[in-house]
Structure formats: structure tokens, C-alpha cells
Image (cartoon, rainbow, N blue to C red):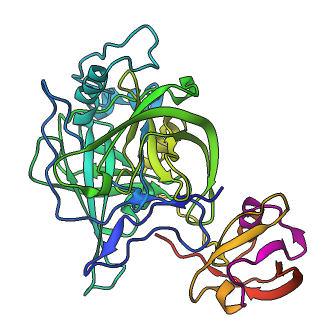
Amino acid sequence: MPVDFDFPEAQPTPPATPWQRPPDATVQFEAPPAQPPSPPPAPPSSRPGGVAPRWLALIVAGSLLGGGAAGAVAGRASSEGNRASGSGAAPVSTNNNGSVITQTGDVQTILAKVQPGVVYIHTQASRGGRFFPTQGAGTGVVLTGDGEVLTNAHVVAGATSIKVNLAGESQARDATLVAADSGNDLALIKINGASNLKTAELGKSGDLRVGDDVVAIGNALDLKGGFTVTRGIVSALDRSIDAEDGGTLSGLIQTDAAINPGNSGGPLVNAGGQVVGINTAVDGQGQNIGFAIAIDKAKPIVDRLRSGQSTATSPRAYLGVSSQPVDGTPGATVVDVGAGTPAAGAGLAVGDVIVALDGTQVNSPDDLSAAIGAKKPGDRVTVTYQRAGARRTAQVTLGTRPTG
């Protein structure tokens, strides 16, 4: 199943075509092009919580999955200060089944608890050169009172400037990157000079069941006027998708809560108002199919990021096609060939069905991705494909997959 990663967190200024699906990625990351930062609304009172970006933000939507506070997160409270989750948050009242939102008012109560610990993120990078700086937008989750914020790695990739808007504040604050794990699409940033911030409570994604109610909060499309809030269910658990860099994200939560560019790095929360996932991707060819990084998987990664050690993904081989399954037969049908890519140079075209790479049978798009992932940039490979009923081969020198 083709998926689109939303890394278009950044769009050049002057504007460029929004990044959607990279040439042979199957998932789309969400981080919408940033507009001038708009202050998020103050925490909700009697009215529904202000809705406040995009993984699709980079562009892919990202939601946080709430899980029980990790020992690494909660256990360091004594030395870090205000590290405990959900400080000062009011308890959320639901029915006996904590996985079910029974009425509309429950969503407003959840927002009152979670929203103060969710932030806008705006970045500026120099991907387009110093005369054409690029801007991006995403979402983040406040982990500690002194300003630690968890987001997607693709939201802050290449950023030369990171600005954060807290709920109820019109003035953006500066933040710096602590470390990033691009292979797991997670990053930790620190708001400069912060103290006594409201934090989001982390839950246990391991307690989730298919059908549980969830809410996604984020900076969808970087729209002015506050966070965007969407509601849905856990549609599936333990999903794996091909990442934009050619790797694989596994153990993901699938949800039908709408996730859009700008949601990237934002929280996916359960009916108890706990973060159970970090929204990170959306299926660009489906409807209401989004993915979040399970919070149980994120917790130990956060501990490593606190040491300041970034984990960069090694350069990955790149063919330059998007593909989808063939009805009833083995192979990967080419649905897009990127201009100037190795595939285009070798003469591959839309409609070709790739059936083997270097003699290894390709039964599906996943097989094709795995076969290319096992190669290195610069490797020369033989692509076997079918066109108009005829079996053909092409010699292709693989390139280096571009990064967000």
C-alpha cells in the first residue's frame, strides 16, 4: 500500500510547489509550509479548547501517542525539575471504559488538559540557498517544565532557526536542537530560558486496542487561529511503512483521526488525555489513514536524545520511482518516475511492472523498497520489468536518496 511521508515541512520563499510524495517513497510526512507564526490560543476555559501543523508538516502530519510516563521521563524529575507529566493538569472524567469518549464535552476536557503542553514549531533553513530560505511548520509536545519538546526529526531537519509558540503566548520563543534520531523520526529540542511550563502527560501505547478513541492535536496546514483538533479511533496497531529516507518506520499506530501537514510531531492522545503517539505520516493515496510513533517506543529514544547524540541515517540508495501492487500477480507497478532520477535515465516509465532487481524476485512494492535498501548509492543494478507483455531489463546506477 503506497504511503506518503509528509516532510514538506518547508516550502521555499518565494513559494514553491508543496512537497508531497518523494519519487519512490510510499508514505508522506506532514509539515506544511510555514506562514508567519500565528499565536496559539490561550488554554480553553468554558468553550472548546482552541484548536491549534503539519508532517504532512514537513510535510507529514504527526501525532503523539500517549503512553504511561516512561521511567526515563518521569524518573528524572528530581534532577531536571518539572519533568513529571501533566503537572497542574486537571483530571479527565470519562466513563468506566477509559478508551471511549462518551460525549462531545469529553473532547473539550481532554483539550483543557493536553493543549497547554502542545506547541507550534516554525523553522527556517537554507535548503534553497541564502537568497531563497525555506520555512517549515510542525508541532511539538512539551515534556519538561524547563522546555524540552519532543517532535519529529523531519520537522527540524536542516533548520538554522527554530521558533516555538506556547499556548497563550503571542511572542515566539527561540529553541535549539538537542539531538535527532532520523531513523526513528524523532527529535528533542529545548526552548531557551524556559521554566515552569505546562507539560503533556505520557501514557502507555501498549495498552491501546483497535477501536479505542483517540484525539489528534496539531498545527494542521499552519492555519491561523489556533490548533486543529480531530477525533477518531485506533484503526490498527504495529504497522510498518517505508520512510522517506528509504528506511522503515515500524510499530506505528494507525488512526483515522485526520492528520495533515503541520501535524507532524504533535500528540495523539487517548480518552484519558494522555499522549500515546507522535503523529508522523499519512497515506497520500488513501482516506483517513494516518500513522503515529507509539509513545512506548519513543520514551527510550528520548532518553538517548537527552545525551545530545544525534543519530543520522546513512546515505541510502535511490531508484526514483513510486510503485503500487499489481492486481493478482507478483510485481510492483510503476506509477511515477521522478524527473532526472536514475530510473528516468534508464528509460523506466509509468506502467512498467518491476519483477526483479539483480535477479531477486520482486513481488510487491515492499520487496522493491527492501531490494533497493540493501544496495548502496553508486551500485549498478539490473532491473527486470514487463512492458506491454514483453520482459525487458535495464542497467541502472543507483543514486543517493534526497533527504527532507
Against 69, is 145 above or below?
A: below
Q: Is residue 283 left or right of residue 371?
A: left
Question: How many dots with numbers?
Answer: 0
- Residue 187 sits above or below residue 326 on the image: above
Snapshot quadrant of residue 86: top left
Task: Report which quarter residue 336 is drawn in.
Answer: bottom right
Question: Magenta span covers which residues?
Answer: 347-369
Q: Would you place residue 363 above or below residue 209 in this image?
A: below
Magenta stretch holds residue 349: yes
Q: Residue at coordinates 44% horizontally, 34% vertically from top-left?
A: 232
In this view, the residue in front, 205 or 211, is: 211
Q: Is residue 258 above or below residue 398?
A: above
Q: Quadrant of residue 60?
A: bottom left
Query: Can you give x and y, in whole percent of width and height, for residue 51 in the image?
Result: 23, 41
- For residue 81, say whether it is visible: yes
- The residue under the point 30% across, 34% down is 80
Q: In percent of the image, x 71 and y 65: which residue is there? A: 369
